[in-house]
Amino acid sequence: MRTDPSATSATTAPHAVSPAHPMTLPARRHLPVSPAGTAVLDVTVPVYNEERDLERCVRRLHAHLADTFPYAFRITVADNASTDATPLISARLEREIPEVRAFRLEEKGRGRALRTVWSASDAPVLAYMDVDLSTDLNALLPLVAPLISGHSDLAIGSRLARSSRVVRGAKREFISRTYNLILRGSLSARFSDAQCGFKAIRRDVAQRLLPMVEDTGWFFDTEMLVLAERAGLRIHEVPVDWVDDPASTVHLVSTAKDDLLGVWRVGRALAVGALPLDRLARPFGDDPRDRRLPGVPGGLARQLVGFCVVGALSTLLYLALYALARTGAGPQLANAAALLVSTVANTAANRRLTFGVRGRDRAVRHQAQGLAVFAIGLALTSGSLAALGAAHAGAAHSTEVAVLVAANLAATVLRFLLFRAWVFPDRTAAPADRTPLHPAEPKGDAR
């Protein structure tokens, strides 16, 4: 049985990333053939005081993989400081079944167990499932196939997909759907089921993603998925057949409380740009949208759309602020104040949403450059107001607004060009192709 005496220290620096890693992930590729006996899939089963179900679960899972999975595999039992006979059963299964490994942690926490085992595994595809095997095992191959093929970065089972077949009580159904609605509303999550204990991830992605995940308990899954989605990684969903375990030991109230606190913590970190999600960026292989064409700047269409949306919202903010300030100040002062506030908001929004700059690095410099662009916009709009006043003294307020809108449109075109070429230039070089470190093999007679 393997133990991890450093498990505690492994979780104390959640945002640390090894400097040996390149700044972006390599393009996704199908795992090539590997040496005989090398495990392609490592399935972790986290357990705590599961002496009643552990052996039945592991033997059933092993039989299923041996009969249906076309690659070499491994099953890792991650014991979370159990106080019953679970460690003894795990050790015996390791002795009796060559593909089973037992791993002992001295602290509880499903997230801690998954982080520790996955970080130590050499398999290119890492998965986990609950010990009760509530999920039908026929979904396991569809879960990991997109990761082996290079199509996706992570994969999750979903009990809330249209074609899923789920048997569970109304209370758990309500809690699950409510929680996922909270994730959609607060964190803009697009995946359908964060809590299903049936997930997989590529090891190269896990090496970058896991150090950013702080939670060591039940919220670990949600945090991992939210960060992966925000970083632009591809998450594959598999509808599952799922039967609730009535003997589950999960404490719903305390788990729900911890999950809500986790939602608040992650949402705050994302809002202030405290997470280095750019380190998870990766090219999409043969996606034609990523091919560079002569004379066509990369990402121009997406940036134009983002800039137009941010610009439209900024214009509405500017007009509202101008109308508010105009009630107690002259047109020039009202224009300068409204333009200053809206420009700061516009620069921050374009920095994050249009040009994909995250974190606080160069944030002050970007705002200073944005203010320089603001000065140009101020000159255009103020000059327009001055010209209007010279041509038509005492012009109506609606005329002022119309002139300002036209001037702002001209300033917007110039602002985009300056943002793209000067404030937020593309500093990322195309990453070199890299062959995956841990290739795969068809099972055949290798095992």
Image (spheres, grey):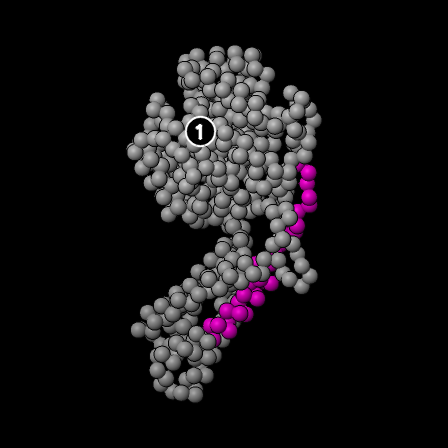
Residue 263 screen position, x and y as percent = 39, 41
* Quarter occupied by the N terminus: top right
Q: Is residue 99 above or below residue 375?
A: above
Which residue occupies 64% across, 26% down?
A: 443
Between 52 and 118, the residue placed more toward the observer is 52
In this orientation, which residue lies closer to the viewer: 400 or 34? 34
Magenta-colored stretch includes residue 421: yes
Decide if residue 202 is in sight here. no
Q: Amino acid at mark 1?
A: Thr
- What range of the chain is rendered magenta? 407-436
Q: Which residue is mark 1?
A: 135
> Which SS class for mark 1?
loop
**Neighbour tally class for label 1: few under 14, some 14-19, many 20 plus, Cα within 10 Å:** many
Left or right: 39 as drawn, with respect to 358: right
- The x, y position of residue 124, in whole percent, is 61, 32
Report whether 110 appears left or right of 148: left
Q: Is residue 71 above or below residue 263?
A: above
On screen, 393 above or below 417? below
Tell me residue 121's x, y (percent). 58, 27
Front position in the image: 67 or 235: 67
